[in-house]
Image (tube, rainbow, N blue to C red):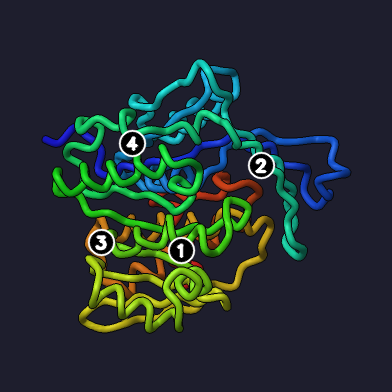
């Protein structure tokens, strides 16, 4: 009987201080503490959906780092391989939440523990036995050492037989378009599973998103490319065909984290070997549930809650 994780994610986890709903960040007085980070959000979502999941990364050896690890543990994420850095702080994200206007966010991640991730933090044992290894484009953009760690992680995944999934998760505050094309762009061709925004594929690869997806299937390692369109519909492209899904109509409370929720929903369906049409429906439902609650992780469902929502929305 397998005792290791089914899925491994690696990247940044930050302490999120979320302003009271509807209040602009510069006017907010009251904040809720939570966790943010592309890969840590995916880890929390997969764990809630019933998949044994491990998160790899660095936090500071400080109160914020302990709070982050405690939140991930509470969701069932294995953080036993996480590194507590005594010389750097845990990254901090301050943001507000509003369904209709652009969000204001301020991140304090320069010199953070998460940006100091290295290949030495990733021993082969941390990945052994996993079926899936997931990374985003954020991690290699943090620092050269973190980029080397991502390439090391992909190497370990290949050695252990795990599939590699990649979501660019482009954040323009981390670099120019050229920086993203140079550092994160090549990872699209290294991934077995790609989940990316329409605008991200167009920026990183050029041309239309559907054409870029088909090119990845022909020229890269990708088995499936999932495109999150700007109208919130989604497209899955494989060598056997393509499928689309329209978004579920729900009342949005906080749109942040929807992309990671969708990615986790898709990966959960892939781990359970569901067909692409069903996988898109489940991923869209996880995202729909996530955006109805404040914060990046509050609305992430369990498997039972997902099933109830699908019966309601379907």
- Name the residue beneath numbered marker 3: 192
Q: Residue at x 45, y 35 (%)?
A: 75
Q: Is residue 43 left or right of residue 111?
A: left
Q: Nearer the viewer, mark 1 or mark 2?
A: 1
Above or below — where is 241 with respect to 90? below
Q: Position of residue 48 (x, y in %)?
A: 41, 44
- Name the residue beneath numbered marker 1: 181
| Label 3 crowd (10 A; few <14 / some 14-19 / many >=20) | many
Is any part of residue 171 visible from this angle? yes
- Name the residue beneath numbered marker 2: 107
Image quadrant holding the C terminus, namely bottom left
Above or below — where is 299 with respect to 232? above
Tell me the element at label 1: helix
Q: Nearer the viewer, mark 1 or mark 3?
A: 1
- Name the residue beneath numbered marker 4: 54
Given residues 200 and 45, the one toward you in this image is 200
Given residues 278 and 126, the one toward you in this image is 126
Q: Position of residue 182 (x, y in %)?
A: 43, 60
| Label 2 crowd (10 A; few <14 / some 14-19 / many >=20) | some
Q: Is residue 173 left or right of residue 225?
A: right
Given residues 58 and 270, the one toward you in this image is 58
Is any part of residue 286 visible from this angle? no
Q: Nearer the viewer, mark 1 or mark 4?
A: 1
Tell me the element at label 3: loop
Tell me the element at label 2: strand
Task: Choose the circle earlier in sequence order: 1 or 2.
Answer: 2
Above or below — where is 181 with respect to 35? below
Task: Choose the circle earlier in sequence order: 4 or 3.
Answer: 4
Task: Choose the circle earlier in sequence order: 1 or 3.
Answer: 1
Q: Residue at x 34, y 44 (%)?
A: 150
């Amino acid at each position: 009987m397998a005792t290791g994780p089914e899925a491994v994610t690696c990247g940044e986890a930050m302490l999120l201080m979320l302003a009271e709903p509807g209040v602009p960040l510069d006017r907010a007085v009251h904040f809720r503490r939570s966790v943010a980070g592309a890969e840590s959000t995916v880890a929390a979502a997969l764990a809630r959906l019933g998949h044994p999941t491990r998160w790899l990364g660095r936090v500071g050896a400080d109160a914020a780092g302990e709070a982050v690890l405690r939140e991930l543990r509470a969701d069932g994420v294995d953080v036993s391989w996480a590194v507590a850095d005594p010389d750097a702080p845990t990254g901090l994200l301050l943001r507000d939440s509003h369904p209709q206007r652009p969000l204001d966010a301020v991140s304090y991640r320069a010199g953070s523990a998460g940006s100091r991730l290295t290949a030495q933090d990733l021993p082969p044992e941390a990945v052994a036995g996993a079926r899936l290894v997931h990374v985003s484009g954020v991690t290699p953009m943090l620092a050269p050492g973190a980029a080397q760690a991502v390439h090391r992680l992909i190497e370990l995944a290949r050695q252990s037989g795990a599939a590699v999934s990649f979501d660019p998760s482009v954040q323009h505050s981390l670099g120019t378009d050229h920086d993203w094309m140079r550092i994160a762009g090549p990872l699209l061709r290294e991934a077995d599973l790609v989940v990316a925004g329409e605008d991200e594929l167009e920026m990183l690869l050029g041309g239309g998103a559907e054409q870029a997806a088909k090119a990845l299937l022909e020229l890269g390692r990708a088995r499936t490319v999932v495109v999150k369109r700007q109208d919130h519909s989604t497209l899955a492209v494989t060598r056997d065909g393509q499928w689309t899904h329209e978004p579920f109509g729900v009342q949005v409370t906080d749109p942040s984290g929807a992309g990671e929720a969708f990615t986790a929903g898709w990966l959960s369906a892939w781990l359970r070997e569901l067909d692409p049409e069903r996988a898109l429906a489940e991923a869209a439902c996880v995202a729909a549930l996530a955006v109805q609650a404040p914060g990046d992780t509050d609305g992430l469902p369990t498997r039972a809650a997902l099933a109830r929502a699908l019966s309601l929305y379907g």
